[in-house]
Amino acid sequence: MTRLLILGGTSEANVLAAAVARAGIEATYSYAGRTQVPVNQPLPVRTGGFGGPDGLADYIRDEAITHVIDATHPFADTMSRNAIDACAATATPLIALVRPPWTQCFGDDWVAVSDLAQAADLLPEGPACVFLAIGRQHLQPFAAKPQHHYVLRFVDTPDGPLPLPSTTVIVARGPFTLDGDLELMRQHGVSWLVTRNSGGTGARAKIDAARALGLPVIMIERPQMPERRTAATINAVMTWLTHETRLGA
Ligand code: 3Y8
Ligand code: NAP
């Protein structure tokens, strides 16, 4: 009897949840609780941290979870590492749905950096208009460059002061469109884009818009992850799930 846990929070996790529900597989969709009104799911939902890898291992045992699919965002690396540890500790089959990173193509003007501080360092000394499309949790490194005007896109309205003096805040959740991001970047006179290499389709519009506008992009590369089973498509994950279930794993 399969009892699946989906670690969600991405566009692909939402599509996976619909496929799992259609297949009639017993599953729970897990959110961290980062946003006020997350998208509804066609599965039972649990929200909030588990309490580290040990807390997740306890959850797996208490809920008799038989399979875990890590469909979190490629920068949710603490959750992914905890899933590796908890599934090893409980001998629970685990697969990560990892969408391929975006790759530079003709006409792109990207500079790759490994962290937010490097991204801030690369911004020019003279004042510019920067589309800082990295959400609201990690703005502090850019306080080192207060001379810029920052266009910020959050899922929820900020609940307190921001560490940047000159900002335009846009409240919107993805998936985003090319026309929408072209309009946003033209309207605000954006001259630089800072983004994580999230991959997927839900938020790639901004890098296509930057190419069309001939803008430089500071691309934050993904954190390295330990060895684990991965799949790049939902079909591959569903094939794994049914195979592992047949084996009674
Ligand atoms: C809570 C679930 C869907 C899913 C939408 C995807 C697409 C938009 C890329 C930009 C970049 C950013 C941010 C982003 C992406 C999708 C997808 C994806 C980037 C939701 C969601 C949750 C979150 C958490 C939120 C973070 C924030 C990051 C905004 C739901 C909408 C910038 C990441 O306010 C906060 O505390 C928000 C925090 C983590 C990063 C940050 O540090 O601020 N995502 N995003 C999940 C949970 O609680 O478990 O609310 O429904 C999911 C999505 N985020 O509906 O199709 O790739 O799947 N989300 C980044 O890439 O830098 C937006 O604006 O262009
Ligand atoms: P993170 O830094 O990797 O994880 C920090 C802690 O948050 C985890 O240790 C865990 O708490 C809890 N957590 C994270 N994801 C969870 C989930 N799906 N269900 C239950 N608990 C979860 O995570 P993050 O980067 O803040 O991402 C949080 C959520 O937002 C994830 O669902 C992710 O898919 C989504 N998201 C993140 C980004 C991003 O840029 N990071 C972008 C889009 C969507 P405990 O240790 O207590 O278990």
Image: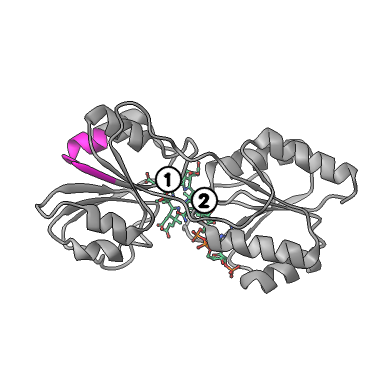
Could you say where residue 227 lies in the image, as x and y percent from the top left?
65, 54
Q: Is residue 188 magenta?
A: yes
* Magenta stretch, residue numbers: 183-193
Q: Residues within 10 Å of mark 2 (few under 14, many from 20)?
A: many
Q: Which residue is mark 2?
A: 74
Q: Which residue is mark 1?
A: 197
Left or right of 48? Residue 144 is left
Q: Quadrant of residue 81?
A: bottom right
Badge number at residue 216:
none
Could you say where residue 69 lies in the image, as x and y percent from the top left?
69, 50
Could you say where residue 55 lies in the image, as x and y percent from the top left?
68, 72
Q: Say which of 14 and 207 sits in front.
A: 207
Q: Quadrant of residue 19?
A: top right
For the residues labelled 2 and 1, say whether their Cβ atoms are less than 8 Å apart. Answer: yes
Q: Using the numbered discs, state the Cα–Cα distance from disc 2 to disc 1 in whole angstroms.
A: 8 Å
Query: Residue at left 31%, top 35%?
Result: 181
Could you say where residue 82 lies in the image, as x and y percent from the top left?
63, 65
Outermost residue on the left side: it is 126
Q: Amino acid at mark 1?
A: Asn
Callout 1: SS: loop
Query: Residue at left 25%, top 37%?
Result: 184
Q: Amino acid at mark 2?
A: Pro
Q: Say which of 16 and 76 sits in front.
A: 76
